[in-house]
Amino acid sequence: MTETAAVPEMKFAADVRFFPWWLVLLWGILAIIIGAMFLTSPAITTVVFITLLGAFWLIGGFITLVSLAFDRSSMGWKIFLGILNIIVGIIILAYPLFSTIFLLAFFIIFLGFWACFMGCLDLFHAFSAKDAGMGVLGVISLIFGLLLLTFPLISAVLVPFVAGAFALVLGICAILFSFTARKAQAAPAA
């Protein structure tokens, strides 16, 4: 009995030593700050987030094109994606407010269609495998997708609040985990 309990502890100890505890703590604090920003001023934080995303795409596009000097595999795709990233990055940086509205709307519509698609697949699986649990998940996913597609503006307005709540929860969990990791890293290896 103690052997089976020792194996997960050893795996946990190995996983905990992968990242320094202070890095996990820092990540948790940063997640809480970002979550609080999304919850207190969602519009400004979302525009800033989308603008940073545009800068990331712009820089990523240039890096993709420069990488062709070192690795010519999948050259056509790299050129296409590099140019596409540069164009999208420039558009987002030139029109941050319009880009924020467009990307949120696109995200909600994509998520709505994806939820409907997954709900239909789950329902098909539930009927073919006679799995009631999968059927319930399929119905929930289908209802969620239809709600997103029926009320896209309300859904888009709620995205920053949901992101903020998730960031707060993840930040708190990361901080708590960092203290556990600190204890595990301080303990001598057996």
Image (cartoon, rainbow, N blue to C red):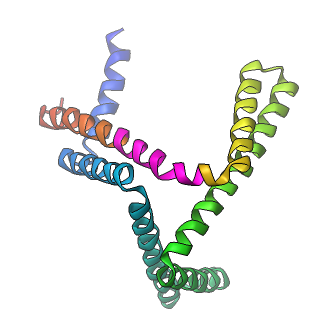
Determine if the magenta segment contains residue 4: no
Q: Residue placed farthest to the bottom in the image?
A: 69
How many numbered badges does the structure rendering display?
0
Q: Quadrant of the N terminus?
A: top left
Determine if the magenta segment contains residue 167: yes
The residue under the point 70% across, 42% down is: 147
- What main secondary structure does the magenta stretch of the protein show? helix
Check the image and report above or below for 153 versus 188.
below
Splitting the image into 4 quarters, where does residue 72 fall?
bottom right
Q: Quadrant of the C terminus?
A: top left
Tell me where residue 22 appears, x and y as whole percent.
18, 48
Check the image and report above or below for 116 versus 92.
above
Q: Residue placed farthest to the right in the image?
A: 128
The residue under the point 70% across, 31% down is: 140
Tell me where residue 137 appears, x and y as whole percent.
70, 29
The residue under the point 65% across, 62% down is: 106
Tell me where residue 118 appears, x and y as whole percent.
74, 42
First to last magenta residue range = 155-169
Check the image and report above or below for 175 versus 76.
above
Check the image and report above or below for 172 versus 106.
above
Splitting the image into 4 quarters, where does residue 178 fall?
top left
Tell me where residue 58 appears, x and y as whole percent.
48, 82
Left or right: residue 170 versus residue 102 is left
Left or right: residue 142 versus residue 188 is right
Q: Residue placed farthest to the top in the image?
A: 1
Which is more toward the observer, 62 or 30? 30
The residue under the point 44% across, 67% down is: 47
Which is more toward the observer, 70 or 115? 115
Which is more toward the observer, 3 or 132? 132
